[in-house]
Image: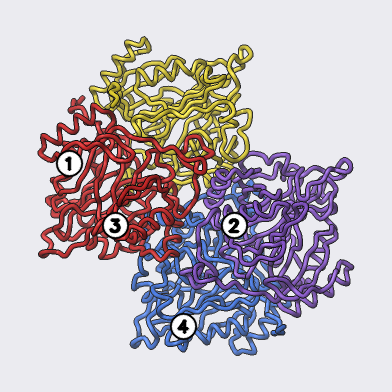
Chain colours: A blue, B purple, C yellow, D red
């Protein structure tokens, strides 16, 4: 019988994500009319949205900005005590920024940066969504009527961040935040960590780090929304294609994560995924699945290869200051 | 800011379930050829199986018995320390049986009875499935080749047990085991607890207690297997219908749980569900959804009403010793 | 080698159907907002609509009327010569009404009544749909953008009419119009013809006659719209349920026709089906499949039995003047 | 009112296709175990198969041969008289070979060559499939039990042939056989006919001619099988991938035809498609949709571009004797 240390179980789930856009009106059209999300609140330079199956008051904050990218990424803890514990651990790791008084939909939060510079926060207090009369569902356990508008994404699922040093960020997520590692891509006989997929709960991954081929910092590869069936992803492709949205890849199936993906660019420039499939990981002693160059291949299980933009493009877009020091890679 | 007690997070997931059958050959045909599970081990009076997406060595133990029903229900803990903690708590609650040396696929376990008398166990050590050459998947993160045989169920999902006193069993599951309550049906202005759906992880429910209309003890309402898409449930219905299996209800959609269900009777007499849909619950402060008589209705969201057998029949089948003392109810 | 007579191949397909409603505004909401059809033209007391995949200018004419029911049912011929031939044959059969100058979307037509009294017409000249800029598809072979609104029905598919004498109407459809018989329900050792499903093309049936249990005339059992996948039917059920529409039966699968059905009542009272599955019949010498009482059963392959209203209710609704002289039957 | 000539309606549907393979055992494994077809008869060097929803005794004849490719392609007529009429027309066109005494599953046939040299035949007399006890369906209108084995293709759908002169073959199919043109690809301001999709019934196309980039004759681009839902195509991809079959393209969606495709190579080398979606054409005056270079693009609506092999490879494979005289093109 082995006696490992007790697992850290302080983070419950991805809470909300701030998406930055230089084209707020068109981005809002994409998230509301094409993905089918609901607007729940409007701030000075931000609109707050959620999917029909998100129980929280808001899960996406769409904020006007000079460039596309990801703003603050929020994780919810399992309790106030867990929030305090993680805040102390982050501070001790030298990554803390400090406490905030909260925002629409949630109470005080502890802000910090991951080693690559992405801004994140932890919080526990959360406002639940209360549907107005017109959006009340005939299902008592559904926070809002299923309107079926657009792709009708159910809820937020995960995000993939670029990082110049994947190992460092993955280690921080595991050791300090308590995320569990699910899959990895490692090149050069395992010496070079190219991508890591992590989660704090049975969802396969809610956070991925993949190497930034241009050596940038704090960039977003993609942000992903869940639909319940593969057929919903196909339907989303039809809707996006009719709306003139650029579909970069899919619908198709990744080998790692087994995710059934559809990547498009919202008008502000961010890569957004409509997603289903994958698998849940329940085992507390899950052994991370590691893929080498050959096994990883093009990152697809079937369907056409991912296009070069899938490696080259992220938000904000940058010029490679110098030749990439890391191997070129297909992140997802 | 509220400061509740720290949540118990010691149980990870449903580990494996023993199904009793008086017709072992025919039941095996049902699980292997119709549901598409794989046989991994054979004991004296038992066959051990798993779904193509179950990572453990075995998740279903099919055992010959005089009557159908459920044998031992096993839950995996998050660690050895968690196993010890829960064993002590159960012992303190007066429900303990004692330690075992394990069985095929898992190490020592702590056995106990829930207040209604169902036998359960907790364990941590688990053998992972290693596919033989012929069943090795082309996907490195899939424990076994997707053969597509029969309904091709991916993994075990949950079970629903009958109990003479739902409240007592629900309370034990919450307080002693650390399950979280997700939904309830309560009649008589909330005074009579008719059914409760619970889980130890984000899966909506892995354990349900529903009132035993015949006043029995230790009985099984149904055991459920997951498929990834609603279309897979429809396809399963076609396959079971062609095999002459009795389809009791569905494919259709429940209102509580939002589960997309298909109930059939395996040849041994147990009610087995092929299941998809429903929703994940990530919130640590989830407020249980409660349905009264009117809201609950027939338990279906759309599709035909559930047949009387859905209330009257469970395994082992019994004569009602006396007129049911509890309200008649549609469990799922 | 056998030498049968040459088959009649003069009718191409169901062209358009007039639906009568006492609640034109609410019915329009149902067809436009819930089923997702487009309004293409407005007359004095009628609105003309089509599905996103209907190539004709209009396929549904929704007309205000005192009672719900079906108005004129139009079939398109393969040529002008075929139109003339069929007009002569109908006239010779004593069922003719006469020529019209056409209506929005089609040229002159020959009107007639089937033996039960339903008004029908034949026409050849047809206006094709030309999408306005905002509805132009990115697919050159799709008449209109896939908007994904509501259930997003693709095209009209078939209708089922009640008739006091099924045999007489079926015979007229076969002999005079050239429809081919696909399936039948016959009771009393084949002596009583309860229902007949017919088509003029490989679609399994575009016209069904089923016995009117109340002895009425000219009534509509249901009118049916096609979606491409079974998943689309399930999705339609979610949308209709959220809109408070009465779902009478399904989603489920019929045994005869193998159709995957969802029956709801539009606000005007007519039974409308969202439909997929079934099968195409290509064989010119297809042998009609006949079901007796026992084989027919409840008319469902799996899923709950059809409710009594499925037999009792049709539009316009009538009181049974006298006890039904025909066997009670589940039409679809 | 216009008065065109009466349409030719003598051909009912694609009857059966002979597939040539140098690896008969492995090809049989592909069609039987992976696609899920049933073996109905065995000849000296041929095995006869059908899909679970094919009503004819056989629809695929798999024949051992030195090279892969297509053997005889059979079309069923609507009557004996129609058979005689078409035989005379073909003879008059100088393409006739002569009458045969039939083969397993059908009576006498009239053999001929299309202008490119593909061998075809017409027949009317057909043996219907009678399922043995073990394969009898619980559905009276289904010729055989739905076994759900492998991809479980329902029926044959269409084939695409390469031709050095598309216009000549398309003209022969229209004028002599009575096929209707559905879509075309034309380059050089319409002067160069690159591909034509035709059918004798409402199925979008049962026969396609696309230009042979290598200047060959009598070659097969692909042969296609139908499944009812897009999800079935995705599932087929999982099954083929697990079996180690080379997936060349898809699952994805074509722009022309709107077909949802999955192309793989059976072990004998022929390109086989698992197919769903597309659309039915009912209009007798359908105006063919024509795509130019720009509109046609890569031939996909969404998903990755088709690979070069989709243009370069057909069966039997040949070396380009000389630089292709025709524009390079993506046929499907």
How many labels sit on residues?
A: 4
Q: Residue at x 26, y 58 (%)?
A: D68
Q: Nearer the viewer, mark 4 or mark 2?
A: 2
Kindly tell me whether residue A38 is visible in this rendering.
no
- How far is the residue under mark 1 from the one under mark 3? 22 Å
Tag nearer the camera, 4 or 3:
3
Assign a secondary structure to mark 4. strand
Q: Chain of mark 2?
A: B
Do residues under tags 4 and 3 come within 8 Å of each other at their CB atoms? no
At mark 2, the secondary structure is helix
Q: Mark 2 packing: few (<14 Cα in 10 Å), some, or many (20+)?
A: many
Q: Nearer the viewer, residue C33 or A172?
A: A172
Q: CA distance from mark 2 to mark 1?
A: 49 Å
Which numbered dot is residue B32? 2
CB within 8 Å, label 1 to label 4: no
Above or below residue B223? Residue D136 is above
Q: Which mark is residue A327?
A: none
Q: Which residue is mark 3?
A: D21
The residue pinned by badge 1 equals D112
Relative to C247, is B182 on the left or the right? right
- In this picture, residue C187 sits left or right of residue A240: right
Both labels 3 and 2 in a single chain: no
Q: Looking at the rendering, which quadrant does residue D311 occupy?
A: bottom left
Disc 4 marks which residue?
Answer: A186
């Amino acid at each position: 019988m082995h006696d490992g240390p007790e697992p850290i179980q302080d983070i419950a789930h991805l809470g909300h994500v701030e998406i930055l856009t230089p084209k707020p009106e068109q981005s809002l059209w994409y998230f509301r009319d094409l993905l089918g999300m609901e607007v729940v609140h409007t701030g000075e330079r931000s609109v707050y949205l959620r999917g029909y199956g998100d129980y929280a008051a808001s899960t996406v904050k769409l904020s006007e900005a000079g460039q596309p990218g990801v703003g603050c990424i929020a994780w919810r803890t399992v309790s106030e005590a867990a929030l305090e514990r993680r805040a102390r651990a982050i501070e001790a790791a030298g990554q803390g920024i400090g406490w905030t008084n909260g925002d629409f939909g949630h109470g005080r939060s502890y802000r910090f940066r991951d080693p690559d510079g992405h801004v994140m926060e932890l919080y526990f207090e959360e406002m639940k969504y209360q549907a107005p009369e017109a959006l009340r569902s005939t299902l008592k356990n559904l926070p809002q009527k299923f309107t079926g508008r657009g792709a009708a994404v159910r809820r937020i699922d995960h995000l993939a961040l670029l990082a110049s040093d994947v190992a460092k960020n993955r280690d921080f997520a595991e050791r300090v935040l308590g995320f569990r590692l699910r899959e990895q891509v490692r090149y050069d006989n395992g010496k070079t960590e190219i991508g890591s997929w992590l989660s704090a709960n049975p969802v396969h991954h809610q956070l991925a780090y993949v190497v930034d081929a241009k050596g940038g910092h704090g960039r977003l590869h993609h942000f992903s929304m869940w639909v319940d069936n593969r057929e919903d992803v196909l339907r989303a492709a039809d809707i996006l294609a009719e709306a003139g949205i650029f579909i970069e890849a899919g619908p198709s199936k990744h080998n790692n994560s087994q995710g059934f993906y559809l990547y498009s660019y919202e008008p502000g420039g961010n890569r957004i995924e409509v997603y289903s499939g994958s698998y849940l990981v329940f085992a507390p002693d899950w052994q991370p699945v590691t893929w080498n160059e050959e096994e990883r291949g093009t990152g697809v299980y079937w369907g056409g290869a991912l296009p070069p933009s899938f490696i080259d493009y992220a938000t904000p877009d940058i010029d490679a200051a110098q030749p990439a020091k890391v191997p070129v890679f297909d992140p997802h």
